[in-house]
Image (tube, rainbow, N blue to C red):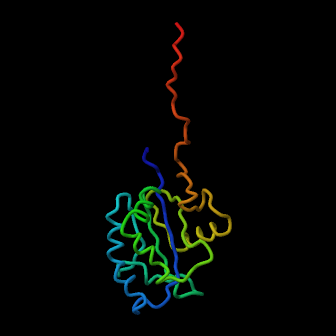
Amino acid sequence: GAMSTHELAQLNIGVIKAPMDTPVMADFANNLDRINALAEATSGFVWRLQTDDGDATAIRPFADNENMLVNMSVWRDVESLNKYVYASAHVELMRRRREWFERMDQAFMVLWWVPKGHRPTVAEAIAKLEHLRAHGPGPQAFTFRHASPAPDAAPALPPLSFGNECPTT
């Protein structure tokens, strides 16, 4: 479609079952660089949160849970991120999530639109997740299943009909 003035931001959080340098987490830790590189090579990737180590595992923003990891990125559109999440080698890691992360009762992933060029802060992202948990999916915060169009997306038009009626002469 036409170039949007918005991009898609994504946050997911997870409580690791053990410290990153333990055998429990080894496969996850050892695959991070590969999966992050895969994201960056995916069409539509814009940005990801990382420290000088090259990933975001050192960022622990939840004071009440130091084992809570955050993963945050920005993408051109929902389709680009969806392709990376569900149609790439990333799927292998997702299938094994239960080996490394505690089960969560509430939403742990949220999508939202940001103005093009905006790099969301962790606090902003967590606020979006809390909004989703409190209000459910909507224009402010949503999920893949209930994705909201970008704020400047053209409204869906009915398909043009080229009917058979003869022009009146």
Would you place residue 30 above or below residue 21 in this image? above
Q: Residue at x 51, y 87 (%)?
A: 67
Q: Is residue 22 above or below residue 104?
A: below
Residue 114: x and y, percent? 51, 59
Residue name at image x 52 percent, y 34 percent: 159
Q: Residue furthest right?
A: 135
Q: Nearer the viewer, residue 50 or 83?
A: 83
Residue extending furthest toward the bottom? 22
Q: Is residue 42 found left or right of 66 in the rendered image?
A: left
Total residue callouts? 0
Task: Looking at the picture, tell me which residue is in the foreground, 101 or 10.
Answer: 101
List x then y, in percent, for residue 17: 50, 88
- Give the camera-side residue of 169 and 88: 88
Residue at the top extreme of this rendering: 169
74, 124: nearer the viewer: 74
Q: Where, by quadrant of the figure, is residue 131 drawn?
A: bottom right
Q: Position of residue 101 (x, y in %)?
A: 50, 82
| Quadrant showing the N terminus | top left
Indicate whether 124 appears above or below 23.
above
Q: Residue at x 34, y 66 (%)?
A: 40
Q: Quadrant of residue 136?
A: bottom right
Residue 30: x and y in percent read 34, 83
